[in-house]
């Protein structure tokens, strides 16, 4: 019989849940506001319990969460959210709050690693073993697969917090990251665009100079990732990335920054096939959670 998985995509404003086995087999979906860990996780558990009554027993659950978090099985804080500015969520044992109610494996990882897995199985990273999934929205984060394995390392990558050079004459805005100011997220996530230009990113017209500057920062970060990780592809998701005018500018600027040094025909001649938009739109995370669930068996 086909396996049945539970998927959780835990975000800073909402938790998405689904029951199924893939994009063509989503049997139930739920969406709950991110309030307190206790209240939100209770709703998640209730959703799965109810779905089991209708669709049968789940084989396993995949939980892809916002971070920072501890994804290391065996660690005393495995499954916990770590220090976060989000009130009430620091040190919350979110995995434990779900796992306690189910006698099945529950996999746990970052939301961006989850989305990377979804794109790998069904989307823009099919057939690859080394790639980056990057989301640029209210925050910036990246999931990395290297040689067929998701990268965790010490904790997990924080691709949004690499420092970027800022020319104060071109960009007087210092950046909003509480930890670093001029990191990638501090300079280029949605709140930075809004703070810098005095209006929300989605209200800026496509020919506004904001996008040229945005493309500059994205290209700086991507060029760094390309040099460090040698990804076979970079997949861009998130609300800011969905601005159509941005991607061609990013392509052009990455070529300028790398300046012919990385001698791959993919970069030199086909960069539009190398830095690409997500294929699964808003579904990458929840579908990736199914893959996490499958891999937990
Ligand atoms: Zn930062």
Image: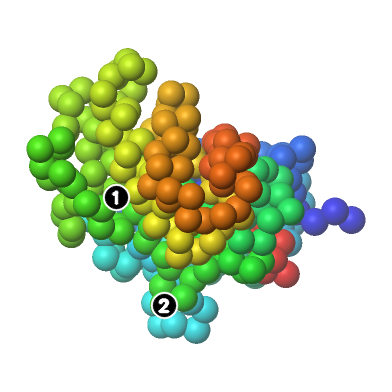
For the residues labelled 2 and 1, the Cα–Cα distance comes to 21 Å
In the image, residue 81 sits, relative to residue 33, either above or below, namely below
Q: Position of residue 171 (x, y in %)?
A: 15, 37
On the image, numbered disc 2 is attached to which residue? 154
Q: For the residues carrying marks 2 and 1, which lies nearer the camera in this image?
A: 1
**Residue depicted at x 52% and y 56%:** 262
Element assignment for label 1: helix
In the image, residue 295 sits, relative to residue 234, either above or below, namely below
On the image, numbered disc 1 is attached to which residue? 184
**Residue depicted at x 20% and y 23%:** 199
Q: Position of residue 246 (x, y in %)?
A: 42, 29
Residue 29 seen = no
* Residue 212 placement, left or right of 252: left
Front residue of 54 and 187: 187
Residue 247 seen = yes
Q: Counting residues from the N terminus, which is met first, the one under dot 2 or under dot 1?
A: 2
Mark 2 neighbour class, 10 Å CA radius: few under 14, some 14 to 19, many 20 or more: few
Front residue of 169 and 5: 169
Element assignment for label 2: loop
């Amino acid at each position: 019989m086909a396996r049945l998985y539970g998927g959780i995509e835990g975000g800073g404003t909402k938790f998405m849940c689904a029951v199924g086995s893939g994009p063509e087999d989503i049997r139930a979906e739920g969406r709950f506001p991110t309030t307190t860990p206790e209240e939100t996780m209770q709703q998640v558990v209730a959703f799965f319990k109810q779905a089991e009554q209708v669709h049968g027993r789940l084989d396993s659950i995949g939980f892809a969460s916002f971070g920072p978090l501890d994804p290391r099985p065996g660690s005393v804080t495995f499954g916990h959210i770590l220090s976060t500015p989000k009130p009430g969520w620091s040190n919350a044992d979110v995995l434990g709050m779900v796992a306690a109610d189910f006698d099945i494996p529950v996999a746990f990882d970052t939301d961006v690693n989850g989305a990377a897995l979804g794109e790998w199985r069904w989307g823009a990273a099919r057939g690859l073993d080394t790639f980056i999934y990057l989301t640029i929205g209210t925050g910036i984060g990246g999931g990395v697969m290297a040689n067929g394995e998701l990268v965790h390392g010490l904790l997990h990558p924080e691709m949004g917090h690499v420092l970027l050079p800022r020319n104060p004459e071109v960009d007087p805005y210092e950046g909003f990251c509480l930890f670093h100011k001029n990191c990638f997220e501090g300079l280029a996530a949605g709140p930075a665009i809004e703070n810098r230009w005095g209006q929300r990113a989605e209200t800026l017209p496509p020919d506004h100079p904001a996008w040229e500057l945005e493309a500059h920062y994205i290209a700086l970060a991507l060029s760094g990732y390309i040099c460090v990780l040698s990804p076979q592809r970079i997949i861009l998701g998130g609300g800011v990335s969905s601005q159509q005018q941005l991607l061609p500018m990013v392509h052009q600027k990455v070529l300028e920054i790398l300046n012919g040094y990385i001698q791959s025909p993919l970069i030199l001649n086909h960069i539009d096939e190398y830095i690409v938009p997500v294929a699964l739109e808003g579904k990458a995370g929840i579908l990736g959670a199914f893959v996490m669930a499958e891999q937990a068996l």
